[in-house]
Image (spheres, grey):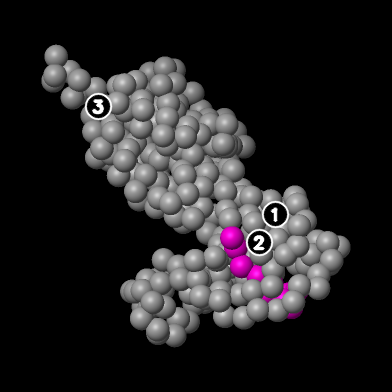
């Protein structure tokens, strides 16, 4: 009986969407899930700072191989920005570097937001995990070293003012993966001339998963104790449900799992998820336009 349970756990693959509370690192949450599920293969798909809360997508079992694709998904946040002060970390945990009076109107704030919509270049915060010559930037910053971080291209699809209560403002940020909302707050303060930093952050969406899909960590911990945490496991195939899907017949599943190509309809482009008739994720596939066939790029075995 114990052996079959062990085998079952080895076969488990999917997604746990957690509503991360403030005060824990993303790694802390992964460790809690590893311990609670007794499954070692688990990883998150986009760091949330300890001060931030909200949607944290955890891949469990063989689904961790989807990480590079899920991590690249767009994100959405509600951010609280405080005007009138800059800090060395760009958030409330840092040392205050400057103070200035806030003589900004709501209209001026909304006008400044427009400058950050679209494809922009952004410099990550000095206190970030970005590596500089093999070292993490925050390690260098803590040691008092000058951190020279290069700007990176990001996409900000939408910025909307939700609440105006100066010196604080609540904004909705819809952006590409890799965007630092702390840098956005800092840069916004520079444009307004009064300085600013981030004092609160809640991720409301990560890829196709929203807060509606997320289970509070406390509730998940209770389910580990009760042994019914499986109810919160989302099938791996849904992790990339915004990708096109191709239903594979039984012989095609076997072909794909052996690395062979299968035919595609004329005019097919890009990537797709190969799904079995039972709804299992079989492979991530890319079209070979020369032969008009699906080429398996990442194969999953049940």
Per the image, the residue denoted by label 1 is 170
Per the image, the residue denoted by label 3 is 9
Q: Where the C terminus falls, by quadrant?
A: top left
The residue lying toward the viewer, choosing from 162 and 208, is 162
Give the residue drawn at x 20%, y 20%.
Answer: 5
| Residue 261 lies in quadrant | top left
Query: In the rendered structure, which segment of residues is drawn in magenta?
Result: 189-199
Per the image, the residue denoted by label 2 is 81
Seen from this angle, which residue lies furthest top?
A: 1
Give the residue drawn at x 56%, y 76%.
Answer: 96
Comes first in the chain, label 1 or label 3: 3
Give the residue drawn at x 24%, y 22%.
Answer: 8
| Residue 223 lies in quadrant | top left
Label 1 near label 2: C-beta < 8 Å? yes
**C-alpha gap between disc 2 and disc 3:** 43 Å
Local crowd at mark 2 within 10 Å, few (<14), some, or many (≥20)? Answer: many
User: Measured along the vertical axis of the image, is residue 144 above or below residue 126?
Assistant: below
Which structural element holds mark 1?
Answer: strand
Report whether 277 appears left or right of 185.
left
User: Measured along the vertical axis of the image, is residue 4 above or below residue 205?
Assistant: above
Local crowd at mark 3 within 10 Å, few (<14), some, or many (≥20)? Answer: some
User: Measured along the vertical axis of the image, is residue 169 above or below residue 241?
Assistant: below
Locate residue 47, reporting x and y percent.
45, 53
Locate residue 147, reporting x and y percent.
45, 81
Give the residue drawn at x 77%, y 56%.
Answer: 164
**C-alpha gap between disc 2 and disc 1:** 6 Å
In the image, residue 194 lies in the stretch drawn in magenta: yes
The residue lying toward the viewer, choosing from 54 and 230, is 54
Locate residue 112, reporting x and y percent.
78, 67
Which structural element holds mark 2?
Answer: strand
**C-alpha gap between disc 1 and disc 3:** 43 Å
Q: Where the N terminus falls, by quadrant?
A: top left
């Amino acid at each position: 009986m114990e052996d079959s349970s062990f085998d079952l756990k080895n076969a488990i693959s999917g997604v746990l969407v957690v509503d991360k509370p403030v005060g824990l690192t993303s790694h802390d949450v992964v460790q809690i899930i590893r311990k609670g599920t007794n499954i070692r293969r688990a990883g998150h798909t986009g760091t949330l700072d300890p001060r931030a809360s909200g949607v944290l997508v955890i891949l469990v079992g063989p689904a961790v191989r989807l990480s590079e694709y899920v991590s690249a998904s767009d994100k959405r946040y509600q951010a609280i920005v405080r005007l009138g002060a800059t800090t060395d970390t760009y958030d409330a945990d840092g040392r205050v570097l400057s103070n200035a009076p806030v003589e900004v109107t709501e209209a001026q704030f909304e006008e400044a937001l427009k400058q950050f919509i679209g494809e922009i270049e952004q410099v990550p915060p000095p206190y970030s995990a970005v590596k500089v010559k093999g070292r993490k930037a925050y390690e260098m910053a803590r040691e008092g070293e000058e951190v020279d971080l290069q700007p990176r291209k990001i996409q900000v699809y939408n910025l909307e003012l939700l609440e105006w209560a100066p010196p604080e403002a609540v904004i909705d940020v819809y952006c590409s993966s890799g965007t630092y909302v702390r840098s956005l707050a800092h840069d916004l303060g520079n444009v307004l001339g009064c300085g600013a930093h981030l004092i609160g952050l809640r991720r409301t969406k990560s890829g196709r998963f929203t807060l509606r899909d997320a289970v509070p960590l406390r509730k998940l911990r209770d389910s580990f104790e009760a042994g019914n945490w499986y109810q919160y496991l989302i099938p791996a195939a849904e992790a990339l449900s915004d990708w096109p899907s191709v239903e594979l017949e039984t012989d095609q599943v076997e072909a794909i799992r052996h690395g062979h190509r299968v035919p595609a309809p004329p005019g097919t482009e890009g990537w797709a998820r190969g799904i079995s008739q039972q709804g299992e994720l079989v492979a991530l596939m890319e079209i070979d336009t020369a032969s008009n066939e699906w080429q398996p790029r990442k194969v999953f075995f049940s």
